[in-house]
Amino acid sequence: MIIIALILPLTASAQFRVGVNMGYGSYAQKELTKFMIAVRNDLNVDAKLVESFPSYYNASINGYHIVGQLNWGVSITWGATGGRVSYKDFSGSIRRDMLVSYWSFGIPVGWTINPDDPWKLTLEATTYYNTTHARYSSELKVADQRNWDENDLFSLNFAVQPAIYVTREIGRFGFHLKGGYNITWLKGYLAEDGATDVFKYNNEKISADWNGYRVEAGVSIFLGRKDDATSEE
């Protein structure tokens, strides 16, 4: 009863924000890069590592519960990157691809330093539960013959992302610019779906490493404000 008595006044004065973000992320992927280098070296031809898990776009949706200077909520984020080893000559071609993507389910908690200013500055930390999907494919072309094989791999990990973002409010809308750094603190090894044994190459386990910088820009709408209730009356 005491907890309910404390929460109800906060809920009455609370507001909500829902939004979408588009961003850009860098991804360390040290183990996957090492894996692709080993694949290249094992081909015994002058193959090239033409892609090594570069930075790429991401997208997210989020919802926040705002009570005074405190912001907390949920977010869902998608991102992807990949690596490629390639070789081609007059007789045919060889290609090895590792395409990886993730879905992150996060719980952000933030504190707005200057809630009364039009340009609001917020410090935030988000805990993420990540699911990684990796598709490793092999292609060999010789004349008119084509051999193709692929493996779908999955892993789970946990991460935390400290960030800082600026919000400009115009009426019920907010425009945001965020920068942060994602830190994977608990990594799972890639395994085939439903398999009990993890995926190995040269007897080494491989994990996805999503460590890296994140920048995002987005738009949101505020709900439950006092001026909204007044306008309805």
Image: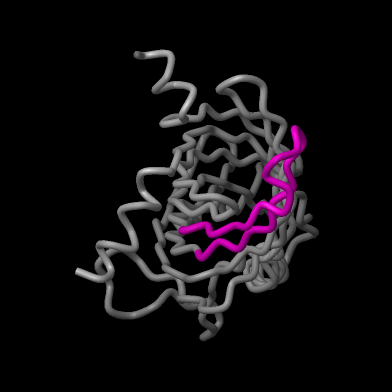
State the predominant SS element of the stretch in magenta. Answer: strand
Question: What residue lies at 70% left-to-right and 37% top-to-bottom?
Answer: 167
Question: What residue lies at 28% left-to-right and 69% top-to-bottom?
Answer: 3
Give percent across and percent down for residue 130. 46, 61
Give percent across and percent down for residue 157. 47, 70
Give percent across and percent down for residue 17. 49, 36
Question: What residue lies at 67% left-to-right and 64% top-to-bottom?
Answer: 162
Quadrant in the rendering for residue 212: bottom right
Q: Is residue 197 visible?
A: yes
Give percent across and percent down for residue 103. 45, 51
Q: Relative to residue 233, is residue 99 depicted above or below?
A: below
Quadrant in the rendering for residue 118: top right
Q: Nearer the viewer, residue 69 or 222?
A: 69
Q: Is residue 55 visible?
A: no
Q: Nearer the viewer, residue 165 or 58?
A: 165
Relative to 138, is 119 on the left or the right? right
Residue located farthest toward the left when viewing the structure as drawn: 1
| Magenta-colored stretch includes residue 125 | yes
Name the image quarter holding the C terminus. Answer: top left
What span is in magenta?
107-127
Q: Nearer the viewer, residue 149 or 215?
A: 215
